[in-house]
Amino acid sequence: AQTVTQSQPEMSVQEAETVTLSCTYDTSESDYYLFWYKQPPSRQMILVIRQEAYKQQNATENRFSVNFQKAAKSFSLKISDSQLGDAAMYFCAYRSMESANFGNEKLTFGTGTRLTIIP
Amino acid sequence: AAGVIQSPRHLIKEKRETATLKCYPIPRHDTVYWYQQGPGQDPQFLISFYEKMQSDKGSIPDRFSAQQFSDYHSELNMSSLELGDSALYFCASSPPLVTSGAPNEQFFGPGTRLTVL
């Protein structure tokens, strides 16, 4: 079974600064997907960014980028120019690509990192 | 754009009672996932359905059952409720499988907050 570990329960960053959230995972699979989800106080789960393991290029979405190190099984999220609206719980998630059947695409989440933005 | 609808948004039940949570996926989405997020916890996968058939099962108690109907909406039935069942229950839906190699994104609903007293 796959496991996802987020070792930083809480992080804080000054507004407009850059912060990096860490995530490591354990899997014996060679093909998989990794995601970062944001959960603001509303508790809605919002997809921030995704990475396919077979792609060497790190994914980027505006101010959000990842550092994907497949050999090290590391998947960190960098938020640049932090904004007050970035304050939320951030979950790293793993999804197998080796599903035999449709609907076998469950997400395995880490325990989350609570990000606080300091004005 | 239409989103995943979950009802009710809040539910309060007594121990040993029964609860039914409903999920209405985005139109034309054929796969539904249920997750349970306890207080201060990460979401845990419960069960999923594809084309009205159960496709995967996680750590779902035997007291819980679920199904997906012909209109693709899904219901999670919970019986003999326990205090530990108090949680936020998410439903997520995803569209028919794409062939481009990109992962099928799961679109999450707003969740149903269940409180068991």
Image (cartoon, coloured by chain):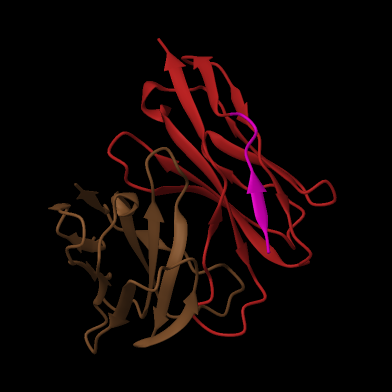
Chain colours: A red, B brown
Residue at the spot 46% in from the left edge and 14% down from the top edge: A15
Q: In the picture provided, is A119 more to the left or to the right than B117? A: right
Q: Nearer the viewer, residue A15 or A43?
A: A43
Quarter of the image for residue B1 reads bottom left
Residue at the spot 32% in from the left edge and 76% down from the top edge: B65
Q: Nearer the viewer, residue B43 or B99?
A: B43
Q: Position of residue A73 (x, y in %)?
A: 77, 49
Q: Quadrant of the C terminus of chain A?
A: top left
Residue at the spot 24% in from the left edge and 86% down from the top edge: B69
Indicate whether residue A6 is drawn in magenta. Answer: yes
Q: Position of residue A44 (x, y in %)?
A: 32, 46
Q: Is residue B112 above or below residue A78?
A: below
Q: Position of residue B76 (x, y in %)?
A: 27, 71
Q: Is residue A88 above or below residue B104?
A: above
Residue B2 visible to an observer of this rendering: no
Q: Is residue B65 above or below residue A114?
A: below
Residue at the right extreme of this rendering? A71
Q: Position of residue A103 (x, y in %)?
A: 48, 78
Residue range corresponding to the magenta coloring? A1-8
Indicate whether residue B34 is drawn in magenta. Answer: no
Magenta: main secondary structure: loop
Q: Quadrant of the N terminus of chain A?
A: bottom right
